[in-house]
Image (tube, rainbow, N blue to C red):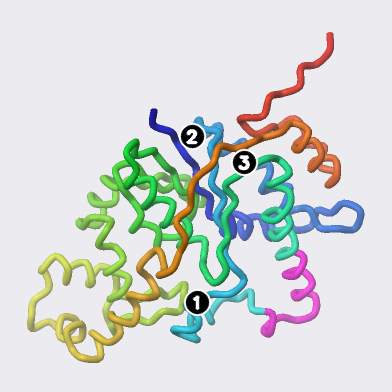
Amino acid sequence: MNKKWLILDCNFLCHRLKHAMGGLSHDNAPTGVIYGFLKSIPMYQEMFDTPRIVFCWDSKTSKRNKLFPGYKANRPNRLEKMNDEEIIFETEFRYQMQMLRRKYLKIIGFQNVFCQKGYEADDLIASVCNNLSECVYRDEAIIITSDQDLYQCLRPNISIYNPNKRKRMTAQGFQKKYGIKPARWAMVKCIAGCSTDNVPGVKGVGEITAIKYLLGDLKASAKAHLSIIAPKGMKAICKNRRLVVLPFVGTRVFQLKKDELSADGWRSVIRSLGLKSIRDKVPMGIRRKRKKK
């Protein structure tokens, strides 16, 4: 029987909550991000009618930085660029993510909480998607993220839901919008680069032009075409392949397990963090305790 999985880009989801929920605390410890994250679990479960969730987290370190030291150097969350107040806020934010990953999700009984040293959530998500697509039963999966790099993971059985836009992208929808198959999206990023990750592509070539090149719709005499096939352009494309093609070399193959969700575990986490307002917003898969008449 085919199963349906939600695959969460956890760092992305936590960053969405960073400023919206960042001020909440309990016993002088920050809890806002944890509160928002736990609250979102049953929401997504109900939205897509499945209790099965895979939690994918970024590692603190990145193997991509060794290949390209400038990778993600443009991100605003670098501690060396912050003042004292910002450092405290960022440190508290990272602490909450760490506690979710290492402690609270496991106490509740979620078994598929993944993080691999040197790798990003994108890599783990892509690895899980590859495994689901290759298995006999071809389980369905919905990736919860806003990261367009993950378009390359789209398959007939795998879609992406962007909570920022409240829109779902399917493989068919992607092909209709861009005119290429999702598997070719990685090559588009290799050519055009990725500004959000500070990965430069072929100079003067954006995603639309890169797609035209791949489709053979770019004139051989066009400046962009000449830039792409030039030695400098080819060098940039080859370098970018190792950075943008998912998953990164060496990513583990993750075996998905059945959750062992516990009502006691949920109540324990809620009680310890003082999150009374979501006590009854129980994730799917946990039996609600019947009220005594």
Rendered view: 278 above or below 59: above
Q: CA distance from mark 2 to mark 1?
A: 34 Å
Question: Which region is colored magenta?
Answer: 79-92
SS state under label 2:
helix
The type of residue carrying mark 3 is Ile
Name the residue: 66% across, 48% down: 37
Q: Position of residue 115 (x, y in %)?
A: 58, 60
Name the residue: 80% across, 53% down: 24
**Which residue carries the number 2 mark?**
48
Mark 1 or 3: the one toward you: 1
Name which quarter of the figure residue 199 lies in: bottom left
Is residue 124 rendered to the left or right of residue 155?
A: right
Query: Where does the C terminus fall, quadrant-wise?
Result: top right
Q: Nearer the viewer, residue 167 or 258?
A: 258
> Of all residues shown, which one is farthest toward the bottom?
231
Q: Position of residue 83 (x, y in %)?
A: 76, 81
**Magenta-drawn stretch contains 33:** no
Q: Main secondary structure of the magenta part?
A: helix
The type of residue carrying mark 2 is Phe
> Of all residues shown, which one is farthest toward the top?
293
Tell me which label, 3 or 2, sits earlier in the chain. Answer: 3
Disc tally is 3
* Disc sitting over residue 41 in the figure: 3
Tell me which label, 2 or 1, sits earlier in the chain. Answer: 2
SS state under label 3:
helix
Label 3, residues with CA under 10 Å away: few <14, some 14-19, many ≥20: some
Name the residue: 86% across, 58% down: 29
Tell me which label, 1 or 3, sits earlier in the chain. Answer: 3
Are the residues at dot 3 and dot 2 in contact (C-beta closer than 8 Å)?
A: no
Rendered view: 146 above or below 63: above
